[in-house]
Amino acid sequence: AISAGSGAVFDRRRNDYRSQNYKTKRRYDRFKFKAFGGGYGIVSGTSEFFGNGIRSTAMSYFPMFIELNGRRCLVVGGGGTALHKIRVLKEFGADVLVVSPTVLPEILELQGVSYRRKSFDRSDLAGRELVVAATDDAEQNHRISELCREKHIPVNAVDQIKDCSFIFPAYLKEGEVVAAFSSGGQSPATAQY
């Protein structure tokens, strides 16, 4: 089972997923899908009751797959989160530049990753087609996001959903077959499950 909300439990009496916090009046809508290689899975999303009707509590992201092979991507930051994002981008063939005053040694060991030991400035965006702001400074990530939006560059500001024009989904990859799962940034750990 894959759930888009956190705190979901399977209620055997109702044969449904329910929030552990019943005061929020949330229900987990279930959708059955045919899984790769046979079998079935359940994808759940949250809805909130309003009177007799149900209205979604959040806007869903449009699932879109883009070609990253050879695309010039920028990752600002050099910690563990940046390392994870760099590995994902490299798995899909991106040309990655990392800008940060310091980086983990694992980042320096990655093949095909360029590194500039410096603080970010707007000139780092020149020619970049996708940006990840993965610093430990929320204000810096916000500033990077605003600059990217001015230049119409897709940006992901880690753990700052309002500063993202796209999000990284959890995904499964087998050769050219890719299945992606998202919680709309609400519960990334659940989407990875």
Image: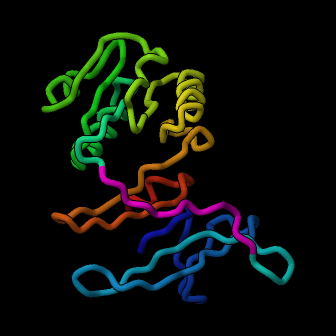
> Hey, which quadrant is residue 27 in on the image?
bottom right
Give the total number of marks visible in the rendering.
Answer: 0
Task: Please tell me which residue lies in front, 120 or 33.
Answer: 120
Residue 116 is left or right of residue 125, and the answer is: left
- Image quarter in which the C terminus is found: bottom left
| Colour scheme shown | rainbow
Chief secondary structure of the magenta span?
loop
Residue 140 is left or right of residue 103, and the answer is: right
- Image quarter in which the N terminus is found: bottom left
Residue 169, percent from left and from top: 41, 55
The correct choice, above or below, for 84 with respect to 77 in the image is below
The correct choice, above or below, for 133 with respect to 55 in the image is above
Highlighted magenta segment, given as a residue range: 55-67
Q: Is residue 57 magenta?
A: yes
The correct choice, above or below, for 62 with respect to 70 in the image is below
Residue 77, percent from left and from top: 39, 24
What residue is at 48 percent from the left and 24 percent from the top? 136
What residue is at 41 percent from the left and 38 percent from the top? 130
Residue 69, percent from left and from top: 24, 47
Q: Is residue 101 magenta?
A: no
What residue is at 23 percent from the left and 62 percent from the top? 173
> Hey, which quadrant is residue 45 in on the image?
bottom right
Residue 79, percent from left and from top: 35, 26
What residue is at 37 percent from the left and 35 percent from the top? 81
